[in-house]
Image (spheres, rainbow, N blue to C red):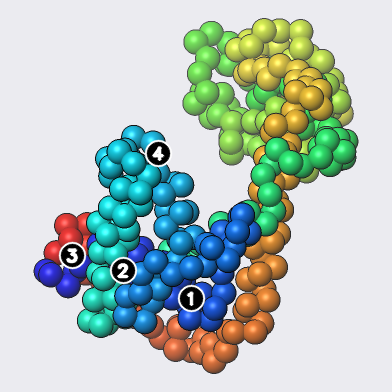
Amino acid sequence: MRRVLLAAAVGAALVAVRHDTRAADAGAPPPAASKADPARRALPVARIGDGTIVVGMLEDRLAALPPFQRAAFGSTDDEVRRRFLLEIMVPEWLFAMGAVEEKLDQQLPTAFDIERALSGAELRVIRDGVGPASAIPMSDVQAYYDAHRDHYDTPERIQVWRILCKTEDEARAVLDKARGDLDPKDFADLARDHSLDKATNLRGGNLGFLTPEGRSNEPGLRVDVAVVKAAQGVHDGQLVPSPVREGDAFAVVWRRGTVPANKRSVDDAAAQIRDALWKARVKDATDKLIASLRSAKLRDLDEKALDDLPAPALGDAGVFAARRDAGS
């Protein structure tokens, strides 16, 4: 129990100690050394074992605290600095070093926590390198808008269900059966039994949402414009009162719903576009880093051993998760 509780308490601190100790031992300035007076920020304020806490580390931690929390450590800046160092940072480092001595960083679940923390830190570095979405220039936004104009300037689209019959008489008979207390199941049954369109007859004749030109949101599906025009002549939920000629066949048409036209200017869509561009750039940077690290670091991948790896029983996984959540 003591080991697991200690592992949960020091996982994040252990990552910080590893990073800061390496930087201090190498004589490198702390991460925020780009701020004013880097020489002063690199001055040590405490040495603990093989690690060193420097001024910049303490400053950065204090800067992240909201004012009400800083006030809890004293009424003067000097008191706040001293108490935060001695009551927060030093105990964190001591716990982390104790965990290293007990090899908790090599045991589950702490080892997983450390890997996640390091991975998350690298992803934050990537995002910082890309910069904020708000910094993406309007020229890039306009270029994206022009390349994806159909996402922001779309006509009204009508959802249509259709049963395609061989003859007009058959279509009228199906239409008579469809009238009255119509529901999707009844129409789907009629489509299954009568529709010539084998691509849609098992899904109620659903053609998707159609543009005025007969293009559907279903990939590769296009419909005779006559079907769309007929559906435009009735309201949502209504059947077209007569069969619609569609090539050599006749269609029973049911208008199911409408998506209104969408017209958004580049200014209206700018925030959404910047977010999409930012996510794409973060993904691109992440993929490039993964590819580079995979090429340089990944080796001895044994696919056969991976295939032969037995999956843990569901009960065992549940027990492990429950123990971890309970901290026992």
* Residue 114 in the figure: left or right of residue 204: left
Q: Which residue is at the front of the view, 127 or 69? A: 69
Mark 3: few, some, or many residues within 10 Å (few <14, many ≥20)?
few
* Residue 167 in the figure: left or right of residue 301: right
Task: Give the image location of residue 214, x and y in percent.
Answer: 82, 27
Q: Which residue is mark 2?
A: 93
- For the residues marked 3 and 2, what is the alpha-carbon distance in whole angstroms? 16 Å
Q: Are marks 4 and 1 in contact (CB under 8 Å)?
A: no
Q: Amino acid at mark 2?
A: Trp
Q: Which residue is at the front of the view, 120 or 291? A: 120
Task: Give the image location of residue 128, x and y in percent.
Answer: 63, 54
Q: Amino acid at mark 3?
A: Leu
Q: Secondary structure at mark 4?
A: loop
Q: Which mark is residue 5?
A: 3
Q: Which residue is mark 4?
A: 66
- For the residues marked 1 and 2, what is the alpha-carbon distance in whole angstroms? 14 Å
User: Residue at 60% of width from left, 59% of height from top?
Assistant: 37
- For the residues marked 4 and 2, what is the alpha-carbon distance in whole angstroms? 22 Å
Sequence-first disc among 1 and 3:
3
Sequence-first disc among 4 and 1:
1
Q: Quadrant of residue 34?
A: bottom right
Q: Quadrant of residue 296?
A: bottom right
- For the residues marked 3 and 4, what is the alpha-carbon distance in whole angstroms? 28 Å
Mark 4: few, some, or many residues within 10 Å (few <14, many ≥20)?
few
Is residue 191 visible in this depiction of the protein? yes
Task: Give the image location of residue 174, x and y in percent.
Answer: 63, 20
Mark 2: few, some, or many residues within 10 Å (few <14, many ≥20)?
many
Q: Amino acid at mark 4?
A: Pro
Q: Nearer the viewer, mark 3 or mark 4?
A: 4
Sequence-first disc among 3 and 4:
3
The quadrant in which the N terminus is found is bottom left
Q: Is residue 20 above or below residue 239?
A: below
